[in-house]
Image: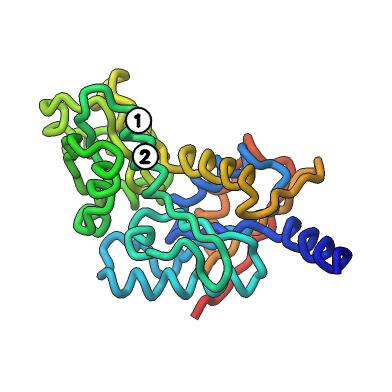
Amino acid sequence: MESMNHELTECIINRAIGVFDSGIGGITVLKELIRKFPFENFIYLGDTARLPYGSKSPDTVRQYSLQNMDFLISRNVKAIVVACNTASTQIFETDYKNTPIYNVIDPGAKKAALATENKKIAVLATRATVAAGSYTLKIKLHLPDAEVFSQACPLFVPLAEEGWHDDPITNLIAFRYLQNLKSLDIDTAVLGCTHYPLLKSAIAKVFGNHVALIDSGEALAEELAIDFERSRMPQKTLFEHGSLTLCLTDAGQQFENLSLNLLSEVISIQPQFETVSVI
């Protein structure tokens, strides 16, 4: 019996961690996870055929997300990271089909509540995430007297997908979205869409260096580290770089080029690309 349990644990240890988003944005989360856990295996699913999620109804986002999670479970992952803020507003489970589930809202909200000094926090997100109000709710769980100001920035997603991360047009659009928040004396801003860290330079130009920008990917990686220590799931311990598979529901050279560029500083092996169906 001990031998069987040992073999089962070894099997789980070597399984990949599944990560999904609607497009390129979740690569910012994946990058932080690979940086923190370079020996783990990862499978990333970009639902590029159906992006963006931010303009979809809650029921549709929930349906897409469950299909994505079922796909990752079919690939025998040991955990699933919902690397999409919009999808995270519609995933309420902490486990799904006996698989641990992580969303980006909970750790991002907690980190923002800890970072603020004057308790004035901005949340930059898609329209769907703003409408759900999840960040405000979660931030106030940690800091009840916080003032939370939400701003939808829908054009940030296509700018990030286009690769216009530090472009004059991006700077202008960032100023247009964020100028009203400058007068509210915020000292912390949550990048409430995983695409938005790609535009961190443009956002920082509007707010200035005194405003802390909270990247949910970094906060999520810290949460996984704690759960590895608590043995919620076994951590791969072999000191060899893990594998990386990037799955897309609609193949595109733009995604491949951008993802390789974003991941270049944290990967040492060429990832495998696949075109898949999740329906």
| Residue pointed to by mark 2 | 110
Residue 190 located left or right of residue 69: left
Across and down, in percent, residue 37 comes to: 65, 42
SS at circle 1: helix
Q: Within 10 angstroms of label 2, few (less than 14), some, or many (20 or more) residues?
A: some
Q: Which of these two is toward me, 155 or 243?
A: 243
The residue furthest front is: 1
The residue at 53%/74% (across/down) is 70
Q: Is residue 248 left or right of residue 8?
A: left
Give left or right: position of 54 versus 66: left
Q: Residue at x 59, y 64 (%)?
A: 247
Total marks in image: 2
Name the secondary structure under disc 2.
helix
Give how far apart the Cα atoms at labels 1 and 2 are: 6 Å
Does 54 sit above or below residue 165? below
For badge 1, the amino acid type reads Leu
Residue 114 is labelled as: 1
| Label at residue 207 | none
Determine whether 39 is above or below 276 in the image. Answer: above
Instruction: Please state the horizontal and vertical placement of residue 48, each as a whole percent of the image.
Output: 45, 64
The answer to whether 232 is drawn above or below residue 121 in the figure is below
Q: The disc labelled 2 sits on which kind of residue?
A: Lys
